[in-house]
Image (tube, rainbow, N blue to C red):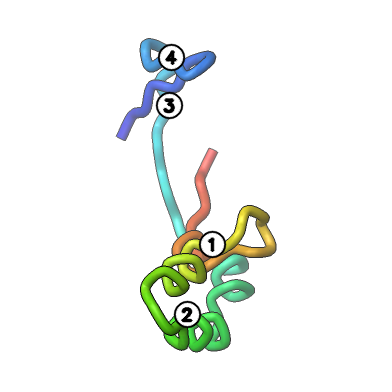
């Protein structure tokens, strides 16, 4: 897929290939059984969603972003 990411949010120029992949290191560190158990132990959907998405920092990644990495 080609994404057009220009300066200041413009979509008119600077075409780049968009690719996603799994990061074995990141997945191994942030997607262990402990994270799965923590996610499934939530009492309602609101808390489940918060745990799945994780926090704002790299070290607070949840299952959703835990295995993804963007390729240059």
Tag in front: 4 or 3: 4
Instruction: Please tell me which of labels 2 and 4 falls first in the chain.
Output: 4
* Label 2 environment density (alpha carbons within 10 Å; few <14, some 14–19, many ≥20): some
| Helix, strand or loop at mark 3 | strand
Q: Which residue corresponds to mark 4?
A: 10
| Helix, strand or loop at mark 4 | loop
Q: CA distance from mark 2 to mark 4?
A: 37 Å
The spot of residue 10 in percent (x, y) is 43, 14
The spot of residue 52 in percent (x, y) is 46, 68
Whether tag 1 and tag 2 are in contact, CB under 8 A, the answer is no
Tag in front: 1 or 4: 4
Does residue 12 lie above or below 5 as drawn? above
Q: Which residue corresponds to mark 2?
A: 39
Q: CA distance from mark 4 to mark 3?
A: 13 Å
Q: Which residue corresponds to mark 3?
A: 16
Q: CA distance from mark 2 to mark 3?
A: 35 Å
Q: Which residue corresponds to mark 1?
A: 23
**Residue at point 47% right, 80% down?**
39
Instruction: Please tell me which of labels 1 and 3 falls first in the chain.
Output: 3
Tag in front: 2 or 3: 2
């Amino acid at each position: 897929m080609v994404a057009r990411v220009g300066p200041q949010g413009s979509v008119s120029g600077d075409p780049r290939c968009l690719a996603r992949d799994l990061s074995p290191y990141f997945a191994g560190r942030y997607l262990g059984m402990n994270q799965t158990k923590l996610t499934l132990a939530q009492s309602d959907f609101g808390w489940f969603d918060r745990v799945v998405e994780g926090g704002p920092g790299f070290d607070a990644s949840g299952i959703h972003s835990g295995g993804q990495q963007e390729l240059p």
